Image (tube, rainbow, N blue to C red):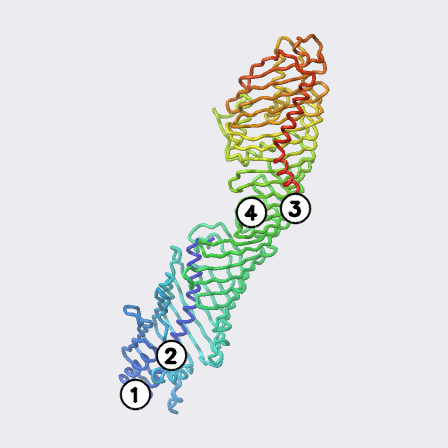
Amino acid sequence: MKPAGVRGGALRAVGRVLHSILRVLGALFVVAVLAAVGLGVYAYRTFSPENARALAVGQLTDLLSRQVSINRLVLSPRGFKVLGLRVRDKRPGAADLVDCDSALVTVDLGALLRRRLQIDAVVLQSPRISLRRDPDGRWALNGILGRRGSGSGSSLLPAALASAQTVVRGGTLLVDDEKNGNKVALKDLSLRVDGFAPDKPFAVEASFSSEETLGGRTLEAAVAASGRVDLAGLNWSSATATADRFSVDLQGIPFTGRATLSSFLPPRLDVRVASPAIGPAGWKSLLGRDVALSLPPVRWSAQGWFPALGMLEVDTITARTPAGEAYATGLLDFEADSPTLSVEAWTDGADLARAASWSPSWAKRRLTGRASGRISVTGWWGRLQARDGSLSLRDFGASWGRRKLSGADVDATASDEFSRVTATASKGRVEALGDVFSDVALALSIKDQNLSLDRLSLRWAGSNIRVRGRVEHLSKPKQVVLSATADKIDWESAARLVADFRAALSSGTARAGGDSSGDRPWLRTFKYAIPRGFPDTAGHVHVGEISHPDFTCRNFDAVWTLRGVTPALDKVNGEARLRFGPGQVKDIPAVQNANQFLRVVFLPFVFMHKMNSLSVFSAGTAYPKSLGFRLIDGEYGASKGVVTTRYFHLDSDQLVAYAQGTADFAREKVDMNILTRLTGYRGTLPEWWVDEEGRPAIGFRVAGDINSPDLQPRFKKIGAHEIEDDVAAARARSRARFQALETRLKRLESK
């Protein structure tokens, strides 16, 4: 891509040069021919060279409203030669408008004998034309030919139009636009006009070279064109000019084409250009920097008109490439104090695989499929603003290392300067994180940096997964709300996927004392797995079935809201509610050791098994290592890093349990009360470890270091319905606390 300064200067220079060349060359032609004709008339009347020179200077000064000087005039039988022709600028100290070394004029002798002047040829040698516009926008040519004096101007013009041939050799054109700060220099300017006539076509050839500094770079160009002009009897709205062939050699890169100006008032342009293949060496020459792009030959066409000086309205630009066609239309205003452009560009069905072959970075992505798109931009180079756009991809595919997308249909639109974006996708297949996600479909929208995920569905590991969500402040997420459902989940696969996903997205994880080691306490392992910049979250997840080598359950349901989550866990605030069952735990210690999240969920069981070390129990232990349960549910609250187990309830044929208390994860401290009731126990228990109905019921408190707490048995009977009453009261409080969140989530899920 060109630097902003280069592109802006180049476009503005093109606009200036186009208008300036047309105006200056036209003015130069008229000035030169009028000067030659005036000399011819006076030479015909009085064959004194000095008299002819003096009369010509006076008449041309009056005609052009500019001071004219001629050093010498030489007469010959076929015409005359002017040496040192100068047309001065009105403004003091400004360069001459025209400074010509010599002008040769030949006449038709036969016509002269019949007392009629007919110019045969006008040749200008090494003219130097200087065109300046002052800071107020006034051009040096303003008012030229504006005065006619005694009418000699009108009498000379028909004679000038009768010139059979006009030639300019070795000319120089300097354009100094002080208003916009642009300077253009055209050197080796050559012009040849054959059979000039006001009412029929005549041939024109022109060429020049240019060396311009744009954006800090000097660019060299050589331009040549040949064609014809039809002035249509000086009816400018019907006049035409056609360059049957033109060539531009820019920094050694050749461009060829043809152009037609179908009207002079207002000018209407039709251009066809063929650009060659441009590789890295070509871009280096053009831009002065390395660009890894190999653009194939492109055929360009453009139609537009100039509604006013310095303003170009482009009806359409078409670029035809092997990968497809691209189009654009717009308006460019070079004349305004702050130049502006408004452009709309689009393409339809571009072949992405072919386009990808143009650039190594694109080829690395292995793009496939076809793309259609549209974009509207306004502003100017360096301050362009995209207003709206759309993109449609069909059978789209791409790769990013080990991640791969294939077979996707994507449609996206953007509006309000891209502050609003909507996108849908279907049929996609994603390979990432060592897994395959098929039948991917999504619908999302972005408004003012807030993302709404209206639908995400996919199939993974034999399960149908559906997700809806919302992300506030997408560039730096502040809050994430989501709702997800899944038919079934393999716990170990899901844990591995989450770990890989976290590692891929996290900007870094907290480290303490070097790398993790096998003997680090379980809570620290859990804490250090939390990525930095974790946003506030709220959501609902429902899974029909969860399987684990040591644990299975149905109807897993979780609702939560969390704020201030950091690896230190010292600012965590929020609450969560879990419910799952029926299910089976084959080996409770194995489940706890296998996954840190499950260890937190089954935290009361950790402390139950601590009771096994008490001497009151036999080697067989009171608490089972395997457990079939009807329901496990619980609620957890967090405030400034201190987690409160508002309640934990287990209902099974073997065991009923209830727990509540606090766990300070920041300081790794615990204080929790646990009530349990066993269906049976072989052995004799103390009186305070049976409830009021004589059933084995044990209560205890755990306190101290959460990794190795102290256990304090309760020496008081548990009431016959104490556990059930505590569970009922806790659930009632939970429903009240989660009512607002559940209402919010239902609105999200109903969309």
Marks 4 and 2, the one that precedes in the sequence: 2
Q: Nearer the viewer, mark 1 or mark 2?
A: 2
Amino acid type at circle 1 is Phe
Query: What residue sits 53% from the left and 18% below the top?
Result: 705
Residue linked to disc 3: 426
SS of the residue at dot 3? strand
Amino acid type at circle 3 is Ser
SS of the residue at dot 2? helix
Residue 240, placed above or below residue 150? above
**Real-space Cα separation, disc 1 to disc 2, in angstroms:** 20 Å
Residue linked to disc 2: 33
Residue 733 shows which numbered tag? Answer: none
Q: Nearer the viewer, mark 4 or mark 3?
A: 4
Q: Nearer the viewer, mark 4 or mark 2?
A: 4
Q: Nearer the viewer, mark 1 or mark 3?
A: 3
Residue linked to disc 4: 447
Q: Residues within 10 Å of mark 3 (few under 14, many from 20)?
A: many
Q: Residues within 10 Å of mark 2 (few under 14, many from 20)?
A: many
Amino acid type at circle 2 is Val
Marks 1 and 3, the one that precedes in the sequence: 1
Residue 128 found in image quarter: bottom left
Residue 47 shows which numbered tag? Answer: 1
Looking at the picture, tell me which residue is in the foreground, 473 or 218. Answer: 473
**Real-space Cα separation, disc 4 to disc 1, in angstroms:** 84 Å
Residue 605 found in image quarter: top right
SS of the residue at dot 1? loop
Q: Nearer the viewer, mark 4 or mark 1?
A: 4
